[in-house]
Amino acid sequence: MSQRRVEVAVRVRPDDTQRPSCVVLNARRRVVTVSDELGAHSSLGSRSYREDLLLDADVSNKEVFRRLILDKMNAATPDTPDTLCFLAYGHTASGKTHSIAGSDAEPGILTLAVEELLRREGVVEVAMLEVYMDSVYDLLAEGAARRIRRRQGPTGMSIIVESLATCTLSTVAQWSAVSAYGMKSRRTAPTERNPRSSRSHAIFTLKSRGVRLCLVDLAGSERQTVFSPQLNKESIAINKSLSRLSTVLEALSVQQTKEDGTRSYVNFRDTTLTVLLQRYLSGASMTTFLACVHPSLQFYPETVSTLRYTQRLKKIRTSTTRSDANDISELRFSEHQTLLDELTRLRTQVKESRATSDMLAAAQRQRIAELERSLHEQRASNTRRGASAQREGGHVERAKDARRIAGWLLSRVLGDMPQLNVGYDDYFDGYFPESIQVIGYVSPMACLAPRAARDTRLAFLDVGDVAIGLSMVDAGIPPFVRLHKVTCHDVAMWEGHECDGDGHAVYVLAFFEVDERTMEPIEGGGAGRLACCGGYLSSEPLLPLATVLCMREDAPDAAKEAVLQRLVALQGEQEDALDRRAGHSREASTAMDEGVPVEALLDRSLVDRGGGADEASLTSDLSHEVARQARDTSNIMTPFRALSSSDESDDTSSNSTSSGSSAAALHSPAAAALEDVHVEAETAPIVPTAPPPPEAAAQRQRPAESPARAADAPEARTKLTSEEPPRPTPPVEHGPTKSTPPEPEPPSGAAAKQLPQAPAETSKKPLPPPNIEEAMRKGKHSKKGKVKGDKLVKPSSCTCNIM
Ligand SMILES: Nc1ncnc2c1ncn2[C@@H]1O[C@H](COP(=O)(O)OP(=O)(O)OP(=O)(O)O)[C@@H](O)[C@H]1O
């Protein structure tokens, strides 16, 4: 006996347009009214349609699933068809795909059905296909295998889709993977009304022991107003298949039972879609049509058309037919047993992998706790350090600014006196392969204290860019960065160096001291390990000790000079910003803006120091700061430690009159120069000076005095410095050769233009007495050669140290 097995539900999606609504639902009477109060589509007027079920815009997919599928699954009896079919129908952008496939935020009916079947039976078989331009494509197959053929089953009622891939699933995770793959394979395209409009009809089949489900996401009926050959072709195919479906439904709705008990003929063969849906519309299933509508007045004609369609569906009557035994969707008993076995095996696997992941999670939790503890400790120690810095010298921020400016002034001195950097340069040079040369570096002040010993507790990061390297001194680097070990010589593996215009590579390496609390070596061959040296992983933000610029040794000097000029220019920009903030004069940076060579900056800085009262007091502040930092090695930004006495016995024996790390740092050649700057700025009037008498030169070559001695004898220091000529650098003795002092090497290039040749011609402030001979006597021969024979010379490519 024929009966009604097609149910119709109307779902109104939320309105995303700013237009008035044209749909009113009367849930009690189950009537939808579509009205055009503004008369925009007056010819159609207001219509009412009675439906089986109404779902308004607040209803979720879960609720739709419960009311339209779950309730039927629960109410199934041996007399009802074992197949449930669910078709989403409606115009474009009305919410069909949202209902069936859902979104990341809201799972669709398909996922909810898979989860339910897995819960009930532990296993489910899934197939997905799409009908595109009247051809069938397997959504779970790849490449050419996607296009598949259909054929009539032996009884004529069923359709067999040949070689359709089916997946047997036992977990939700497996389903997630399968559905993501299948959905991605669907043909979609942006259209006028839907940025992800389905260009095909999709049919999803779920089979388990008791139930089989067919979910159909029909492509939306649409009118193309924008000309696009492809979209138009697709639209024609979509509208044609929907129109044939409509014809079939119309025929079914008026289908008569003949005298011999047979039913009048309905032609399903015109399109692939109707062929595939035949069994679901002919009594072998309980079928639900979900008519999706958009409430906006803009979609008034489409909404009326969809609801008219539903009226036809309500008239369809079918007689029950049983499933075709040869249908591919049939699960046979032996298969069932196999599936149960597989299910048991998979469940055991899941249990085991859960145990493993529990162990991993416990280890990770422990590691996180450790990291949090050390972070906490470090924060506490930073706070203590910050508080003591405030007690000592006032505001921390101001001290930082002063340090930067002081560092810059000092770099001008050192820029022209590379011999004072000898220990520092050698320190970094010692780490790199012969082919790589250090050409400049950016560092906080106290790092200038040379460290002769090769200390392997250093790590570096190739930051790839001079500007980034410069800003890192202040900003630091974020945590969880992999750093190279200092011994890493595999230059090809250093990341992302920049190249100058002529293709000369510039390596910008930020150096960090290895701290066991915040950095750990990466052991084993895991993915996090650097292939060249293994590397360290930092778990905390870090501030570099120094950022070192390197180039290939054989790069032309002009290229090296250009990189340094760029560094100087960048530093100038930073200094400008600081000046603006602090309200200082910009005069000091003018030279950099104009691109004056590094050598010339020394003179300009000395002239600046001879300026007005404000500058003099600034210089005095700065020189205090310089000296203070030379003593202070505890700052977080200056973790270079002082020279140990075993490393530098010569240094300490010749220079030191006190002990302890700060004293050691102070008596390095650079620190001696700093001390000189300090004393001079405090006491010396700035006067043009005469060339030094030989004794003064000899005096200048003596070891630097301790701060205590300097403070005790300001007169002597004043006298000494006032007698100092700024240039030329005196000859030095080196090694065993104690011959006649050679002539000082004349300055060359830009330096020759800028540096005074005779003291009488200049008003520049005299240079503090650097302890050059001491530095040279220490025998720190840079492999780049800062000493030639008995002569002290500038390196062929200048080294610039800028803070
Ligand atoms: N009930 C709803 N709740 C929230 N968002 C919805 C709802 N219905 C539809 N949408 C959203 O509207 C947009 C269009 O919906 P969807 O893609 O489902 O339309 P469609 O009817 O399948 O269109 P087409 O036929 O062009 O493929 C999507 O971004 C979707 O998330």
Image (spheres, rainbow, N blue to C red):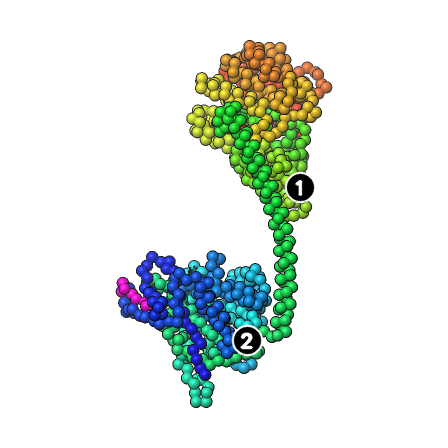
Report x, y in % for residue 659. Answer: 65, 20
Q: Cα distance, mark 1 to mark 2? A: 60 Å
Q: Is residue 802 left or right of residue 24?
A: right
The residues colored magenta run: 32-39
Nearer to the camera, 44 or 486: 44
Residue 610 visible to the viewer: yes
The answer to whether residue 222 of the structure is visible from this angle is no
In the rendered view, would you say 450 is above or below 313?
Answer: above
In the image, taking residue 471 as reference, residue 304 lies left or right, namely: left
| Picture coordinates of residue 358, whole percent (x, y) | 62, 52
Residue underneath mark 1: 533
Q: Earlier in the sequence, mark 1 or mark 2?
A: 2
Q: Which residue is mark 2?
A: 160
Q: Quadrant of ligand 1?
A: bottom left
Q: Is residue 456 above or below residue 709?
A: below
Counting every numbered tag in the picture gives: 2
Residue at figure coordinates x 37%, y 71% from the top left: 51
The spot of residue 580 in percent (x, y) is 43, 29
Magenta highlight on residue 33: yes
Q: Is residue 285 above or below residue 14?
A: below
Q: Check disc 2 and give the amino acid type.
A: Ile
Q: What type of secondary structure mainly makes up the magenta span? A: loop
